[in-house]
Image: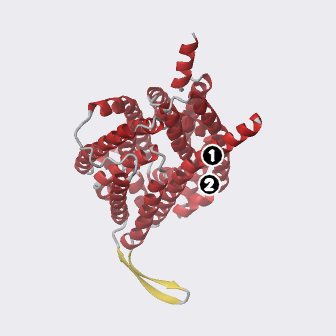
Amino acid sequence: MEQVNKRREYREALWVIWTLAWPTMLEQVMQSAVQYIDTAMVGSLGTQATAAVGATTTIGWLIGGSIGAFAIGFLAMISKACGAEDPDTAQRTSAQAVLSVLVIGSVCTLLTTALSGLIPGWMQLEESIRPVASRYFLVLYLPMLPRTASTVLGTALRAAGDTKTPMKVGLIVNGINILLNFLLIYPTRTLCLWGYSVTLPGAGMGVVGAAAASAVAFTWGGFQITRALWRHPVISPRGRGLRPDRTILGPCLRIALPNMLQRFGTSLGYVAFAAMINSLGAVATAAHTIANTVESAFYIPGYGMQTAAATLTGQAYGARDSRRMKSITAMFLPIEMALMCLSGGALFLAARPLMGLFSPSREVIDLGATVLRMVAVSEPLYGVPIVVEGMMMGVGRTRTPFLYNIIGMWGVRILGTYLCTQRLGMGLVAAWGCMIAHNVLLFVLYMVSYVTGRWDPLAGAEKEGTT
C-alpha cells in the first residue's frame, strides 16, 4: 500500500511540475521562433545588417537581466506567501512590484534614450555600421516601461502558479512582431503565390523596421500583463496603493540585490565578451550573433524547468513542508538532464542547417556550425546550474549564485577570451571554448551545492533541531 501511495504522489508531483513548466517552455519556444525569424529576415539584408543588430544584443541582456533580477525578490516573496496561504502579503507584494515597474521602467527609458548614440562605439562596432545600430537600439528600447511591466509583473503571475497567462500574452506578442516585421522591414513588393501575383505593402525600413515591430509588440504585451495582474483573484494589487512599503521592499531587496549584482555582473561580462568578438570583424560578429540565436532555443527545457523549480520550492518553503521540498526537488535533475541531452544532441546534428537558415555566407555558416557543435556537447551539464539556481531563487538564497556566476564569468570566460583573442591572436572558436569552460565550472559548483544540501534552508533548520 505504501508503494502505491508513493507512486501516486510521484505522478501527482510530476503532473504539477509539467503543468508549471510547459507554458513557460511554449512561451520560450515562440520567443525563439521569433528570434529565428527576426535573424533570418535581417540576415537577408546582408552580413552588416546582422552585425548591426547583434552588436547591441548583449546590452539588451544587461538591461533585461538587471530588471529580471529585481523581479526575483517579488517571485520569492509571492510564492512563499501563496504557500503559506497569506493573500494579504501576496497582494501587498504585487502592489510594490507595480511601483517598481513605474520607477525602474522610467529610469531605463531615460538611460537607453540617452546612451543609444554611444553604445555602438563602446561595442567596438565597425564605423560604417554604427549609425544604423544606434537607431535600431533607440527604437527597440524606447518602450522600456511596458517591457519592464512584462518582466516584473509576469514573474509575479508565475510565482502565484499562473504560467499560462504570460504564455498566452507572449504568443500574441510574437505574432504581432512577426506580422509587423513583414510590413516594416521590406519595401512594397510583388509575390507570386500559386500562380497569382500579390502585392504586399511594406515600409522598407530595414533594420529599424525590425526594431519598430518589436517595440509595438512589447508595448501591447506590457499592457496585457498589467491588466492580467489587476484581475488576478489572489495577488491583485487593486486598492492597495502604490506607496513604498518597507516591510515588503526590504526583504525583496535583500533577495533581489545579490541576483541583481549577479545578472549585472554576468551581463556586463557578456558585453565585454561580445566586444572582444566584435573586434574580430564582421564575419565573427555575424557568426556569433546567429549561433547565439540558434543556441538559445536549445536551452528552453532548462529555463522551463527553472520556473517550475523556483515556484514549487518557494511554495514548499512558505508552507515549511520539508518532505514536499525534498520529494519535488529530487525529481528535477533527472528530468532536466534527460531533456538537455536530447536538446544537445539535436543541436549537434542540426547546427549547420540551422546556420544556413540565417546567412547566405559560407564563411559565416562554417564558423557558426563549428562553435554550435562544440557547445552542444556541454548542453546537458549546463542544465544542472539552471535548475539548481531556480531552487535557490525560490527559497530566496541568491548570494551563492551571485558568487558562482561572477567567478565563472570573469575568472574563466572573460579572462580566458581576453588572453585567447586579444593576446594570442586566436578567433571565435577559442572564445566559445572559454564559454564552455565557464559552463563546466558552474556545473561542478551547483552540483556540489545541491548534493551537500546547502541550498535548502529547511534542511538546515532540521539539523539545528536535532542537535
Residue at horizontal 75 percent and vertical 39 percent from the top? 4
Residue 293 pos. (x, y %): 50, 53
Q: Nearer the viewer, residue 337 or 99?
A: 99
From this view, report whether residue 377 is shown above or below residue 180. above
Disc with the residue nearer the chain's start (1 vs 2)? 2
Q: Is residue 416 visible?
A: no
Total numbered badges shown on the rendered structure: 2
Tell me where residue 66 appears, x and y as whole percent: 36, 40
State the separation of the CA atoms marked 1 and 2: 9 Å
- Which amino acid type corresponds to the residue marked 2 in the rendered image? Ala
Q: Which residue shows up at 31% across the image and 33% down it?
A: 249
Q: Give the labeled residue for mark 2.
A: 351
Q: Amino acid at mark 1?
A: Ala
Q: Position of residue 367 (x, y in %)?
A: 56, 51
Quadrant where the C terminus sits is top right
Residue 239, compared with residue 30, is above or below; it is: above
Q: Secondary structure at mark 1?
A: helix
Q: Which mark is residue 64?
A: none
Q: Are marks 1 and 2 in contact (CB under 8 Å)?
A: yes
Within the image, what quadrant is residue 331 found in? top right
Neighbour tally class for label 1: few under 14, some 14-19, many 20 plus, Cα within 10 Å: many
Name the image quarter holding the N terminus.
Answer: top right
User: Looking at the picture, how far across and down is residue 240, in whole percent?
Assistant: 27, 44
Circle 2 packing at 10 Å, graded few (<14), some (14-19), many (20+), is many
Question: In the picture provided, is 313 more to the left or to the right than 125?
Answer: right
Residue at the image point whose x is 46% and y is 60% from the top: 168
User: Badge 1 is on which residue?
Assistant: 376
- Outermost residue to the bottom: 196
